[in-house]
Image (cartoon, rainbow, N blue to C red):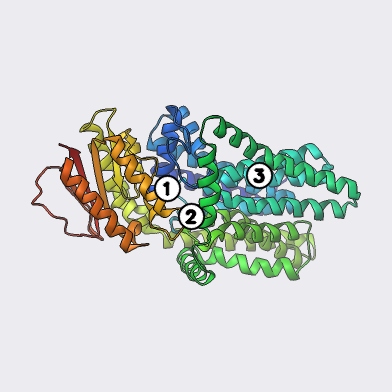
Amino acid sequence: MKNKSPAELVLYCFGAAVLLAAVCFRLRLLHLPIDRDEGEYAYAGWRMCHGGIPFLDYYNMKMPGTYAAYALLFLVFGSTIEAIRWGLIIVNLANTFFVFRLASLWYSKRTGIYAAICYLVFSLQVELQGTCSHAEHFAMLFVLAGMIALTKAVEKKSLSLVFICGILLGIAFLMKQPAASFFLMGGLLLITGFAKIQAGSKYFLRSLLTLAAGISIPLLIITIVLFAAGAGNNFLLFAFSYAREYISYLTLKDGWNTCIDVLSMAIRPGILLWLLVPVSFLSILFLKKTKGSANSFFFFIFSFLAVSAGFYFRPHYFQFLLPSVSIIAAAGLTSWENFWNQDTRRWSKLQFISLSYLVLAVSVFVYNERSLFALQKDEEIVRRIYGHDLFNATKKAGEFIATNSSADDRIAIFGAEPEICFYAKRLAASGFMYVYPFLEKQKYALTMRGKFYEEVLKSHAEILIYISNGGTWYANPGIHQEMFDWYKNYRDSSFKRIALIDIPVKEPAIYHWSDDTTIHPVNEDNYIEICRRK
């Protein structure tokens, strides 16, 4: 802190306070029940720890990178919810540091601190599922590290750093396919960066080929490994052919409406912080240009492309965008400081003005989210985040099954809650981790549905579960009815009910741990039925 101005000292203290507060809040969530996406990663990661092979023992369109990340967390911390939450804390802190480092390289250290503060707040928003360990967090870990390596590669004209960047971006793709948009950004930054230093055309070509080679290696390795394990054909089918069908499902109009809904929900509690983004865009465009202006603009564009994959615009997709908007917001603050600074005597005052606005913006966010921060019970936080008690119920369902079944029993789930298998530490009857692929208007749906029925029958599952939830079955009521009828016939022929969890819309779930079939759910659209083989 030697020779630091008062404004800089206050900035460091404020940054440290925001960091500490964010970590403390995340530590409070160590026991928070996981949602269905986390449940998928958790079940797959747990299976990997016990020899399970992606796309052979369980399959979906998602890349295996996040499954492997969860498996690593379980090996280090144990196969628990706490391991998942610790993983998110570690990844979030690493991403915060990388945002700071990237903004510092593109602009200045002060911009980096501003960006880190913005990212800590943006990435915490429950409206964007910032408290959940989704694939976007892990993908951005490698994207940010790759962008740092690429920035240094341009400065030093280093092909080895270009290759490292490619490797990192390739790993990001293995975390989630939309990270492929950053391949294009990497190539563009190479072209614009080397153009500024007037590198020759041969060096251009060599650097682009080096980047492409680095990107290809992680995918090539995982493809070889999966083919050697006998899962290669399923890998190509689910991760590429089916994924291509999935992203062609919605229209641009559908996506636009969803995007507006999600952003309006997210912007409201942190309005002053989000306001920095458009203002900063104008600052970057019309005030004095800096070396990072083009980079941060490109970063935003390609981040938004990643968010836009398939026009789904799910809240957690926006985690792809948050590093770029954090850097842009920070760059806007420092660009205004530089624009109005005429002499060193005004410099500290200008810094205090920017910092005061940032403090106010963060304070407004904390005030607007005070009801969330004040909650003490995990059950209440789940209802606050999701608006219902489903993920509290799936946790208790999994724990109930764990104590009422044998370790080698299998679970057949008609629904979309693979976290139940993770909680129970029981194998699923089918490799399909949820029913979404069967309901979508895609050419593989009928074949996949038939394979699911076949696997359920062959597994001789001891536990049979039906989950009625609007967020699962809404896509295709006709197929839902067909699957429910199949489930009901199968249940009545071989199973008896042992538990019913009734999940009202706004009230806590009601748990009936009994085989009394005269009890019926109050909410027919939201309940869990657990049956055991007779």
Q: How dense is the environment of label 2, judged by Cα within 10 Å: few (below 14), some, or many (20 and up)?
A: many
Spot occupied by residue 126 in the image (x, y as percentages of width and height)? 43, 55
Pointer 1 residue: 37
Pointer 3 residue: 169
Q: Is residue 2 visible?
A: no
- Taking the spot 75% from the left edge, 44% from the top edge, the residue there is 211
The label nearer to you, 2 versus 1, is 1
Pointer 2 residue: 316
Against 507, residue 416 (above or below) is above
Disc 3 element? helix
In the drawing, what numbered circle is on residue 168?
none
Disc 1 element? helix
- Taking the spot 67% from the left edge, 57% from the top edge, the residue there is 299
Return the disc, 2 or 1, that comes first in the chain's sequence: 1
Contact? badges 2 and 1 (CB < 8 Å): yes
Disc 2 element? helix
Label 2 to label 3: alpha-carbon separation = 20 Å
Q: Quadrant of residue 28?
A: top left
Return the disc, 1 or 3, that comes first in the chain's sequence: 1
The label nearer to you, 2 versus 3, is 3
Q: Amino acid at mark 2?
A: His
Label 2 to label 1: alpha-carbon separation = 10 Å
Q: Amino acid at mark 1?
A: Asp
Q: Is residue 458 left or right of residue 61?
A: left
